[in-house]
Amino acid sequence: MAGSSALAPPGFPAELHAGNRERLVAALRGHLSGSARPLRGLALLQGGEEQNRHCTDHLELFRQESYFAYLFGVREPGFYGAIDIASGQSILFAPRLPPDYVVWMGEIKPLSYFKDRYKVDVVFYVDEIAQVLQDKFSEHGKALLFLLYGKSSDSGNYSKPATFEGIEKFDTDLSTLHPIITECRVIKSDMEIALMQYANDVSSEAHIEVMRQVKPGMKEYQLESIFLHHAYMYGACRHCSYTCICATGENSSVLHYGHTAAPNDRTLNDGDMALMDMGAEYSFYGSDITCSYPINGKFNGNQTIVYNAVLKAHNAVISHMQPGVKWIDMHKLAEQTILESLEKENIIHGDIGAMMARRLGAVFMPHGLGHLLGIDTHDPGGYPEGLERPKEPGLSSLRTIRELKEGMVSSYLSD
């Protein structure tokens, strides 16, 4: 029935994040042992901070920094978190809030609340970081802090290493943590996959609700509104994984349409195709679903040809996907399948092998075949050390060329 859902939002998965911390500790111990380094030190991460809108006092809706969310699941801003590599002990540092916080923002929760909610071993205040680390972890001299610093292969931006007053009193390592925690994020646990399944189920329902209501004369932003309402009203998904792309007509050919300069504001016309690329996020874990259909419910001849070509490529990739397969081979399979469909319909002419060699597929699919998916829509780990991004047209847009492994989660035929 329209305007309802059979889904029930899961509770907060503290055990999921505890498991993520355990996997990181195991990976760090393995790396240190393998390089003949002592099993000592702490992984220290700084959570995100609330941001004001430019020079105003308007606070933007906060969403936690993704690596911090992965390890601790903390939704509040201003936190730090540490994990002792030797013992596996987890520590949160909460901001010390002023007394008038309770008037403007609500209850000031005690440290015990954060210990219980986030299932960590101990909680202190942020202004106690230096003293706590010195008192508890400096028995072998200066405590060693493994800080998060590394480059995203998607954005080219660098993660921000933790900093606090007194950090100069500690030894720091800026190179070890980032590649190891990134690799941990590549392989999802069963609990992570279940949470992503829920986010995708909510998104699927929301997409279906958009399909039910779409009709000529509507605005693209109304379709976005329907999706957002359903995901939040029935799925408790306050955040989306990315900016909604509600593209109709010629807008459907713009890969990342929907941004502020192209704000989903076209009027839908009878006969238009709609390309809806939207995904809800739940408890930090995301979804990414794209679907295309005629807004009047009837494909014309050309729409049928293109739709079936993409559908055939999608099905071919899914049927060949298994551990051990290389991502780049799946991309080329999709390209070849699309070219074969277009050649069959006399839209293009010539030898498919020659077309592939000349990279003609990049004309029809200039983006890469999807991406890793998780806490971020474009989840990290696409190009670990030793993997180089291809230079050829189309292939240069691939967000990874990794070999598939069990536990990876990805979104295919989507960028």
Image (tube, grey):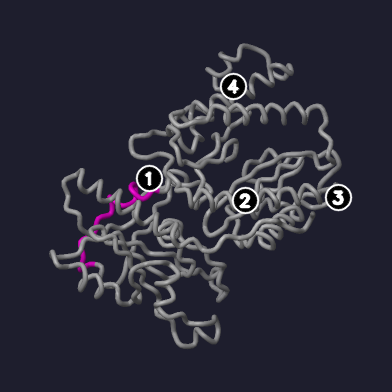
Figure quadrant of residue 141: bottom left
**What residue is at 57 percent from the left and 37 percent from the top?**
412
In-image side of 215 versus 264 (left or right):
right
For badge 1, the amino acid type reads Glu
- Could you say whether the residue bearing mark 4 is in a helix, strand or loop? helix
Position of residue 168 measured from the top left corner of the image (x, y, whole percent) = 22, 67
Question: Which mark's residue is nearer the viewer, 4 or 2?
Answer: 2
**What residue is at 35 percent from the left and 73 percent from the top?**
123
Mark 2 and mark 3 in contact? Answer it, CB < 8 Å.
Answer: no
Give me the C-alpha separation between circle 3 and circle 1.
47 Å
Give me the C-alpha separation between circle 1 and circle 4.
31 Å
Could you classify mark 4 by the number of other residues whose Cα lies within 10 Å: few (under 14), some (14-19), or many (20 or more)?
A: some
Q: Which residue is mark 1?
A: 183
Disc sitting over residue 413 in the figure: none
Q: Which residue is mark 3?
A: 217
**What residue is at 49 percent from the left and 31 percent from the top?**
322
Question: Which mark's residue is nearer the viewer, 4 or 3?
Answer: 4
- Could you say whether the residue bearing mark 3 is in a helix, strand or loop? loop
355 lies above or below 183: above
- Could you say whether the residue bearing mark 1 is in a helix, strand or loop? helix
Give the mark, 4 or 3, whose residue is nearer the N terminus: 3
Give the mark, 3 or 1, whose residue is nearer the N terminus: 1
Decide which of 116, 172 is in the foreground and name it: 116
Q: Which residue in the rendered view is the most extreme toward the left? A: 140
- The span picked out in magenta is 168-184
Question: Which mark's residue is nearer the viewer, 1 or 4?
Answer: 1
Indicate the quadrant containing the N terminus: top left, top right, bottom left or bottom right.
Answer: bottom right
Give me the C-alpha separation between circle 4 and circle 3.
37 Å
